[in-house]
Image (spheres, helix red, strand yellow):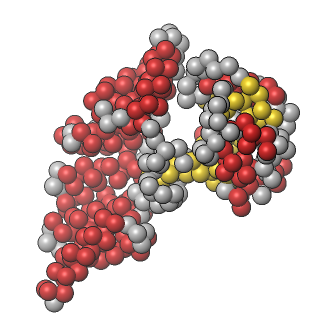
Amino acid sequence: MIVKNEEDCIARCLSSVQDAVDEIIVVDTGSSDRTVEICLSYGAQVLTYEWNDHFAEARNCGLQAATGNWILWMDADEELDRQDASQLKQLLAEQEEPICWVHLVNFIGDSPNENDAFHIAHSRIFRNHIGFKFKNAIHEMLNLDEVLPHFTDTRQQTLPIKMYHYGYMNECVEVKKKSERNIRLLEIEMQKEDHHPWIKYHMATEYYRMKDYVRAFEYLNLAIVHFLQRETAPPSLLYKLKYSILISLGSVEGAWQGIDRAIQMYPDYVDLHFYKGVIYFLKEWYVEALPIFEHCIELGEENIKHLTLKGVGSFHPWYYIGLCQEKLGQHELAVRAFEQAIQRFPDYTPALERLEGKVGLHHAVE
């Protein structure tokens, strides 16, 4: 781990892993609160590191001190599922691949709720001493392409381990301050001739978080072009962000013509199908939107190889089916659809609100 002034959350993180790992190595980049003291109380080895605006170098400092056969890397605002942690060593003892993914749950609402979160498989565990290290000054990533140049997605092993990330929840995000720092570091990276297209994508996400959708869209398109120039298919989450931006901008005309091409590239990505349904709904093509939302429900949301918003394969499409049926004057079918959404997520406010209005109307009609 690398940390700085994390006294509010570091204990939650370390207590979740302390019984699952043999050593805890923390690289502290200049904490002035109780972070170091808390880490030491969990038996961590704390390395002092002078911050140099480079996340990968700081993380590699900790990597050099690690003696174990396997590395689990985390951030202070994350937590390993306590039950899953107990089986981690057994799972790794049976593991042949040198790198493993875990199920990362990114909470985004006011309180931790797996229904209000993005889910994705994330490479957080790898074998030590075989050449793995981190690269990039910001949004550091493993040098998988150097260590395993022929590694393909078909070899990806996602362990039945959940990790929870609290850093994007409403109370945790000091968006502007954090984004200003990130943008500054990303701009430095972009000046390097050999920078990776991910850098432009991360720039787009920073502007997206700041709700500067026009600038986010500019950087996103640059990232897509950069991937194509490297003769690499742009990863699926670039297209997810693209259509999320266009919908946020209200640019439905710009969105509906290209989304089929994105779906053709990633037919198993339920979020793209859901965005297509939303675009059709906004264009008032209610009849045509219905089978798209039904297909989202068929696809489900268990495929976390793509960054997936919880509900896009369940309660969200049921809600939109209800809205479409409302627009088509099918009030009874609308009520049933909203009820289906609530069955899957009992606290789903949009459907509850529609149902309150519709149930009164439904009884009046009867």
User: Is residue 54 positioned above or below 158 on the image?
Assistant: above
Q: Quadrant of residue 224?
A: top left
Q: Residue at x 14, y 72 (%)?
A: 329
Q: Position of residue 246 (x, y in %)?
A: 27, 39
Task: State the residue lying farthest toward the bottom.
Answer: 366
Q: Report the side of 225 relative to 117 (left or right).
A: left
Q: Report the side of 237 relative to 158 (left or right).
A: left
In this view, the residue in front, 239 or 214, is 214
Instruction: Tell how many labels.
Output: 0
Q: Report the side of 252 relative to 213 (left or right).
A: left
The answer to whether residue 328 is seen in the rendering is yes
Q: Quadrant of residue 295?
A: bottom left
Q: Residue at x 79, y 45 (%)?
A: 41
Quarter that holds the N terminus: top right
Q: Residue at x 47, y 31 (%)?
A: 178
Q: Residue at x 44, y 30 (%)?
A: 177
In this view, the residue in front, 35 or 352, is 35
Q: Position of residue 93 (x, y in %)?
A: 84, 49
The answer to whether residue 142 is seen in the rendering is no
User: Is residue 272 positioned above or below 288 on the image?
Assistant: above
Q: Report the side of 285 relative to 311 (left or right).
A: left
In this view, the residue in front, 201 or 210, is 210
Q: Quadrant of residue 151?
A: top right
Quarter that holds the C terminus: bottom left
Task: State the residue lying farthest toward the front.
Answer: 33
Q: Position of residue 57 (x, y in %)?
A: 67, 21
In this view, the residue in front, 218 or 166, is 166
